Image (spheres, rainbow, N blue to C red):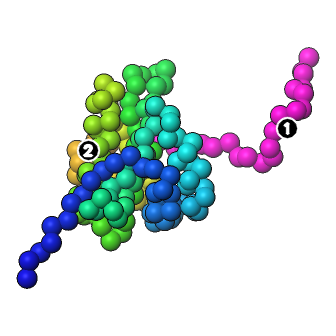
Amino acid sequence: MATQQLTLETRRATLADASVVSRLTLQLGYDCSEVMMRQRLARVRDEPEHAVFVAAIDGLEVVGWVHVELRKPLWCDPFSEIMGLVVSAHHRRLGVGRALVDRVRQWGDERKVRDLRARAQEHREDALSFYEALGFELYKEQQVYRYPDEAPIDPGGSPTLIE
């Protein structure tokens, strides 16, 4: 019996991908509905400093996605950063993640930005091993702080002056 050869392609994500991209996002442990993902994709699709790519088998079945952002901090030259990457649990270790990272590297090259960075939480050992296997090197370790959103700011309110 002959083995069927599947082809993998990477392409820009579209709003039509929102359903599968949201389901894949759940595999990362983040709550995300199709409606939420459609809004998020719409928010970044026309931003030149963002790109979302999907990996599809035979051009049909989306099995992974990656979001990259061009960062321009004051403290260093511009760099691209992988903001999120997920491959379906059933399609890992088949080259899908590598293909997505290769697409991100191409995107960076088109913008003359060779410095590519990625973050992974320490407990995500598979992600750490994945990036290291692709040649990424540990750059630094840090804590991430977030200001709690306790109450919305009243946009119609007036500032308090302290004299």
Out of 30 and 91, give the one closest to the viewer: 91
- What secondary structure is the stretch in magenta mostly built from? loop
Q: Does residue 4 appear anywhere in the picture?
A: yes
Q: As displayed, is residue 142 above or below residue 70? A: below
Residue bounds of the magenta highlight: 141-163
Secondary structure under tag 2 reads helix
Secondary structure under tag 1 reads loop
Q: Quadrant of the N terminus?
A: bottom left
Q: As displayed, is residue 27 above or below residue 37? A: below
Residue drawn at point x = 40 percent, y = 25 percent = 78
Give the residue at the far top of this rendering. Answer: 163
**Residue 39 point in image, percent of width and height:** 59, 50
Q: As displayed, is residue 149 above or below residue 113? A: below
Side of 67 relative to 103 (left or right): right
Side of 136 relative to 31 (left or right): left
CA separation in Å, label 2 and label 1? 44 Å
Residue 150 lies within the magenta run: yes
- Which residue corresponds to mark 2? 102
- Mark 2 or mark 1, earlier in chain: 2
Side of 36 relative to 71 (left or right): right
Occupied quadrant, residue 160: top right
Q: Mark 2 near mark 1, Cβ–Cβ under 8 Å?
A: no
Residue 12 lies within the magenta run: no
Q: Quadrant of the C terminus?
A: top right
Q: Residues within 10 Å of mark 2 (few under 14, many from 20)?
A: some
Q: What's under tag 2, amino acid-wise?
A: Asp
**Residue 4 point in image, percent of width and height:** 15, 72
- Which residue corresponds to mark 1? 154
**Residue 130 point in image, percent of width and height:** 28, 55
Occupied quadrant, residue 140: top left
- Total marks shown come to 2
